[in-house]
Amino acid sequence: MLDLLAAAVAPDRCLHCRAAARLGAPLCDACRRALPWLGTDGCLRCGLPRACLRRRCPARGAAFSGAWAPLAYEGPARALALAAKEHAARRVAPWLAAAMTARAPAALLAGTEAVVPVPPDPARLRRRGEDHAGLLGAHVARAVGLPCLPLLARARSAPAQHAQDRAGRRRLAAPDVLAPPPATVLLVDDVHTTGATLGAAAGALRAAGARRVVALTALRTLR
Ligand SMILES: [Zn+2]
Ligand SMILES: [Zn+2]
C-alpha cells in the first residue's frame, strides 16, 4: 500500500540513467529512444541479427529449432535486464514481455501450444526472491493467448557461465521435467547468451516428448 502511494506521488526513475520516467515506464524517453532493437531479418535459428551460414550458426545442433529476441543486450537494454534480475522484476517484466510478443516473427510463434519458462537457479532464487523468467513467461503467455506451464525445475545450482569454458557450457546439466510437455513449446527466458541454458532446457523438453522447441528471450548478446 505504501509502495502504491509512493508510486502515485513520485515519478518513476529511469532504470538506466535515473532521470524522471513516465509513470510505469522502466526507462526515460531518451533511453527508450536509444534502445538497441533487433529486427526480424537476422538468423531465426540463433537469434543473431545477421544471416548465418548454416554450418557456422552458433545454434547448429542445438535442441531448440529457432530463437529470437527483440533487443540486443547493450546500453539501456542491459540496464533493463539487470533491473529485472535484481530488484525491479515486476516493473520490467510486463514491458519486456510486450516488446517480445509485439515484435516476434510470426514464423517463430506459429503452432506453439504453451509457454514454458526456463527454470530459476535455486541459489539465485533464494538470494533474489523473484523468478524473473517465470514472471516473463506468465506475461508472454497472457499476451499470446497460450497457457504458461512451469514444467521445468532445477534441483541444483549451475556454476556461473562465465566461469566455464565453451565445452563446459555445452555440457550444462539438463533441468528436470515435471510433466509431459505439449508437442510444440515456446521456451521463454530473459537473456540468450551462449544458448547453453536454452539448449539444456530444450533438450530436456525434447527428451520428455516435445517435438519442436523454439526460444523467445527479451535480450540477445551479440557475440
Ligand atoms: Zn534514462
Ligand atoms: Zn544463426
Image (cartoon, helix red, strand yellow):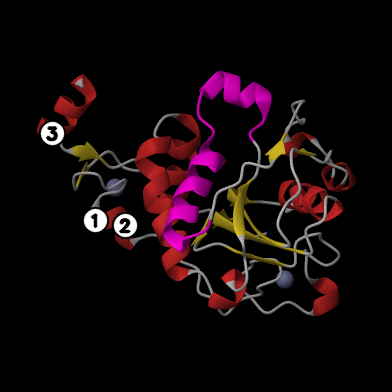
**Magenta-colored span:** 120-146
> Residue 32 bears which disc, if any?
2
> Residue 135 bears which disc, if any?
none
| SS label for mark 3 | helix
Q: Position of residue 12 (x, y in %)?
A: 22, 38
How many residues crowd mark 2 within 10 Å: few (<14), some (14–19), many (20+)?
A: some
Amino acid at the residue labelled 2? Arg
Give the residue at mark 1. Answer: 29
**3D distance between C-alphas at marks 1 and 3:** 19 Å
Amino acid at the residue labelled 3? Ala
Q: Earlier in the sequence, mark 2 or mark 3?
A: 3
| SS label for mark 1 | helix
**3D distance between C-alphas at marks 1 and 2:** 5 Å
Q: Is mark 1 within 8 Å of ligand 1?
A: yes
The reply to whether discs 1 and 2 touch (Cβ–Cβ < 8 Å) is: yes
Q: Is residue 95 above or below residue 174?
A: below
